[in-house]
Image: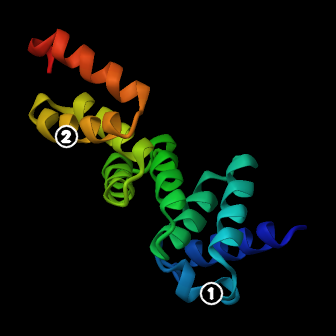
Amino acid sequence: MSLGRILCAACGSLLMLGLLLPGEANSAEPGLSDLSIVEIEAIAREAYDAGELDEAILFWNAAANRGSVTAMVSLAAAYEESSVSNATAMAKKWYRAAARHGDVIAMVSLADILLDQSPRNRIEARVLLRRAAEAGNAYAIDRLRSIDASPSTF
C-alpha cells in the first residue's frame, strides 16, 4: 500500500470518527504537515484517479489552504463532481480564490457556473471572462462573443 493510500485511509477514518474536519487536514493529520504541497497534491491526484473523490477533496483542501492555486482549481473541479449539498458553493469559493490569484481556468469555470445559475450574475461573469480573454484564453473570447451576440439570454 502506498503512502498516499495509507494517509487517505487514515484521514478517511478520522473524518468518519469526527476527529478531523474538512479543511483541517494540514494541521490535524499526523505526518501531513511534514509533506510538501507537491506531495499532498500527488496524494490527492492518486486518490482522485482511484475514484476516491472524498479523499481527493480532503487532500486538495489541505494543499489549497496552504496557498496552492493548482489545488484550489482541482478542489473546485472535484466539488463540481461531488454530490455534497454545498458542492456548488464550495466550487465557487475555490474557483474565486484561484481567480484572485490570476488563474485563467478558474476565471472561466467560475464565470460558467455564475452564468448557469442566474442572469443576475452576468456582470461578475463578464468581468471574469474579460480577464481570461485578456490573458489569451480562446474559450473566454468565444464565450464573450456568444454573450454579446445574444444579450437577451444573459
- What type is the residue that disc 1 sits on? Ser
User: Seen in the image, is 154 located left or right of residue 135?
Assistant: left
Q: Secondary structure at mark 2?
A: helix
Going from the N terminus, do you reach mark 2 or mark 1 first? 1
* Image x and y of residue 99, in percent: 34, 53
Disc ID at residue 96: none
Q: Nearer the viewer, residue 83 or 131?
A: 131
The residue identified by callout 2 is 127
Q: Give the alpha-carbon distance from disc 2 to disc 1, as whole Å.
A: 37 Å
The crowd level at tag 2 (other Cα within 10 Å; few <14, some 14-19, many 20+) is some
User: Seen in the image, is 1 located left or right of residue 22?
Assistant: right
* Image x and y of residue 32, in percent: 66, 83
User: Seen in the image, is 20 located left or right of residue 101?
Assistant: right
* Image x and y of residue 147, in percent: 20, 18
The residue identified by callout 1 is 33
User: Height in image: 140 above or below 75?
Assistant: above
Q: Are marks 2 and 1 in contact (CB under 8 Å)?
A: no
Q: Residue furthest top?
A: 149
- What type is the residue that disc 2 sits on? Val
Closer to the eye: label 2 or 1 = 2
